[in-house]
C-alpha cells in the first residue's frame, strides 16, 4: 500500500463491504484497497459476512495481520441486506465511510478522487460510476443494449434521487447515524444495526439505498457525482440473459412504487397511487406495442421496451402487496 500522503488533509475513511459467498472476489477487492494511493494509515476496512456459512472467514482472518488493526469484520448471518449494511456503518469509527460491493474493483486512486470531490463540493454524499465488465461469451445484443450501464454526470453535478445507489459512494457517517432510531446503552452490533440507517423493510427486496438517499435529501443533504472514481463490476454469464434482466426490471418497478407510496400519507398518498397506477397501465401498454414493432428490426431496442413493460407490471403488482426478493436466496 502507498504510504506517501497525497495531501495533508486526507481524513481516515472506512471502506464498508457486505459480502455473501464471494470469498475469492473479496480477497481481490481487499488487495485493491491495500493498493490505494490514499494515505495508508487513513484507510480502514469494515466487512460484514452475510453468509450463514461464514464463507469469508478464512479470507478475513488471513487479511487481519496485513491490515494491522485497520480491518474489522463481523458475521451477520441474518438474510437482510439492510441489517448487513447497517452493521458495517456501526462497526466503522471514522467520520467518513465509503461503500463498495464485494464484486467490484476500484481504480488505485478511487478513494482520493472521492475525497477530492467532497472537498470541492462540501457534499454529504459523493456517488461515482459503476462500470460493467462482461464475462466471455456474453451475447452481443446484451452489450449493445447497455442494460447494465447507468447514466454518468460531470463531477460536482447534483445527483437526482432516481440515480442514487450504494455500490460506489462516499458518505458522511454522522449524517447516516442521524437517521437511526435511539440506541439503548451497551447495545450489541446487531442491536445497533436494527436501528438503521438503512430501512430493514427493504432488506430482502432491495431498494434500501434509494430509501436512504430519499431521507438524506429530505434533510437537506448535498449529494453529488464524482466521475473520476469508477469501480468495475463483473457481469457474469448467468445474469446476461433476458430472464434475469426482465425479473430485475419487474423488481425495480415494485421498489419504485413501494418507496413512492411509503413517502406519503393520507390524500397525497392516494393521489400518488392513482397517478402512478394509471401511468403504469398506459406506459406498459405502449411499451408492449413498441416492443413488437421493433422486434423484426432491432432486437436490443425491442427488449429495452419489453423491460419497460416489465417495470410497469412490477409497479402494478406492488399495489397488491407482491414483493420479489433479491437477498437471502440460497
Image (cartoon, helix red, strand yellow):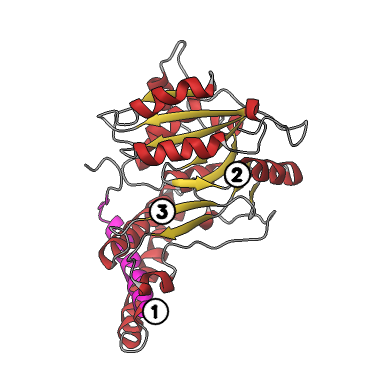
Please name the residue that numbered disc 3 is placed on: 234
Sequence-first tag of 1 and 3? 3
Q: Is residue 199 visible?
A: no
Q: Residue furthest top?
A: 186
Say if the magenta span includes residue 213.
no
Indicate the quadrant containing the N terminus: top left, top right, bottom left or bottom right. top right
Give how far apart the Cα atoms at labels 2 and 3 are. Answer: 17 Å
Which segment is the magenta one?
Answer: 300-324
Please name the residue that numbered disc 1 is placed on: 301
Indicate the quadrant containing the C terminus: top left, top right, bottom left or bottom right. top left
Please name the residue that numbered disc 2 is placed on: 108
Give how far apart the Cα atoms at labels 1 and 2 are. Answer: 36 Å
Q: Pinpoint residue 67: horizontal percent, then vertical percent.
A: 53, 24
Give how far apart the Cα atoms at labels 1 and 3 are. Answer: 23 Å
Q: Badge 3: how crowded within 10 Å, few (<14), some, or many (20+)?
A: some
Q: Secondary structure at mark 2?
A: loop
Q: Pinpoint residue 328: horizontal percent, then vertical percent.
A: 27, 40
Amino acid at each position: 500500500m502507498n504510504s506517501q500522503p497525497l495531501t495533508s488533509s486526507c481524513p481516515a475513511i472506512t471502506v464498508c463491504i457486505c459480502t455473501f459467498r464471494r470469498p475469492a472476489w473479496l480477497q481481490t477487492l481487499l488487495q485493491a484497497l491495500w493498493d490505494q494511493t490514499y494515505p495508508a494509515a487513513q484507510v480502514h476496512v469494515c466487512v460484514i459476512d452475510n453468509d450463514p456459512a461464514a464463507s469469508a472467514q478464512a479470507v478475513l482472518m488471513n487479511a487481519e495481520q496485513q491490515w494491522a488493526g485497520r480491518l474489522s469484520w463481523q458475521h451477520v448471518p441474518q438474510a437482510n441486506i439492510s441489517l448487513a449494511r447497517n452493521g458495517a456503518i456501526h462497526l466503522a469509527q471514522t467520520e467518513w465511510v465509503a461503500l463498495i460491493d464485494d464484486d467490484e474493483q476500484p481504480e488505485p486512486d478511487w478513494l482520493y478522487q472521492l475525497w477530492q470531490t467532497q472537498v470541492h463540493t462540501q457534499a454529504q454524499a459523493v456517488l461515482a460510476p459503476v462500470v460493467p465488465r462482461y464475462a466471455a461469451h456474453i451475447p452481443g445484443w446484451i452489450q449493445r443494449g447497455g442494460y447494465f450501464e447507468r447514466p454518468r454526470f460531470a463531477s460536482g453535478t447534483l445527483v437526482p434521487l432516481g440515480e442514487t445507489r450504494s455500490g460506489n459512494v462516499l458518505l458522511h457517517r454522522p449524517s447516516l447515524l442521524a437517521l437511526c432510531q435511539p440506541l439503548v446503552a451497551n447495545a450489541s452490533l446487531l442491536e445497533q444495526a436494527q436501528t438503521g440507517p438503512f430501512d430493514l423493510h427493504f432488506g430482502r427486496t432491495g431498494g434500501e439505498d434509494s430509501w436512504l438517499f430519499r431521507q438524506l435529501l429530505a434533510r437537506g443533504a448535498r449529494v453529488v457525482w464524482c466521475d473520476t472514481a469508477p469501480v468495475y463490476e463483473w457481469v457474469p454469464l448467468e445474469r446476461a440473459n433476458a430472464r434475469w434482466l426482465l425479473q430485475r426490471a419487474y423488481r425495480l418497478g415494485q421498489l419504485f412504487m413501494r418507496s413512492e407510496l411509503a413517502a406519503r400519507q393520507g390524500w397525497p398518498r392516494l393521489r400518488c397511487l392513482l397517478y402512478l397506477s394509471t401511468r403504469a397501465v398506459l406506459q406498459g401498454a405502449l411499451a408492449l406495442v413498441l416492443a413488437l414493432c421493433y422486434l423484426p428490426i432491432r432486437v436490443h431496442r425491442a427488449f429495452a421496451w419489453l423491460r419497460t413493460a416489465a417495470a410497469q407490471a412490477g409497479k402494478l403488482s406492488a399495489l397488491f402487496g407482491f414483493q420479489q426478493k433479491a437477498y437471502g436466496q440460497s
